[in-house]
Image (spheres, rainbow, N blue to C red):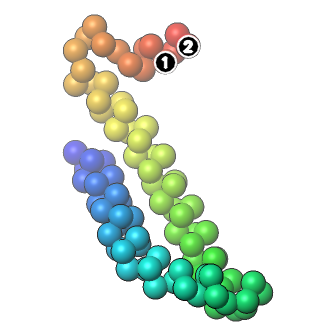
Amino acid sequence: MFTIIVFTQLQYFTSTTLSSFYLDVIKDSLYSDAEKSLQRRSIQTVLFHVSGLCLFLQVSLSCTLGFMAEKVMPPDIQFLAMLDRL
């Protein structure tokens, strides 16, 4: 259950806080600042680290959610077993 809560909160954070506020504020700087400007490079560094962390969390949680989902599926539908046969 904890995994589902964390995954939902991560999705909410990404779609609301990052998308509607932070990305909206920084996009002008990314488009208009010089390519080598300190502000633009700082923003790119932050985006690199934030996207890497979000990706790491999503991949980790997706595996856990997959195992949790398989446990509640009917016995005749075993998705992970089907993947082993591929």
Farthest residue toward the right? 36
Q: Position of residue 50 (x, y in %)?
A: 52, 69
Quadrant holding the C terminus: top right
Kindly indicate the quadrant of the structure image that contains residue 40: bottom right
Assess whether mark 1 and mark 2 are in contact (beta carbons under 8 angstroms): yes
Kindly indicate the quadrant of the structure image that contains residue 19: bottom left
Q: Position of residue 38 (x, y in %)?
A: 70, 91
Q: Is residue 6 visible?
A: no
Residue where numbered disc 2 is placed: 86
What residue lies at 44% left-to-right and 50% top-to-bottom? 58
The amino acid type, in three-letter code, at marker 1 is Leu
- What secondary structure is found at the residue carrying circle 2? loop
The amino acid type, in three-letter code, at marker 2 is Leu
**Residue at mark 2 to residue at mark 1: CA–CA distance:** 5 Å
Q: Position of residue 36 (x, y in %)?
A: 77, 87
Q: Badge 1: how crowded within 10 Å, few (<14), some, or many (20+)?
A: few
Q: In the picture provided, is 81 more to the left or to the right than 16?
A: right
What residue lies at 34% left-to-right and 38% top-to-bottom? 65
Q: In the picture provided, is 24 more to the left or to the right than 10?
A: right
- In this view of the protein, which residue sits in the foreground, 71 or 44? 44
Q: Which mark is residue 7?
A: none
Q: Position of residue 74 (x, y in %)?
A: 22, 15
What residue lies at 29% left-to-right and 30% top-to-bottom? 69
Q: Which mark is residue 83?
A: 1
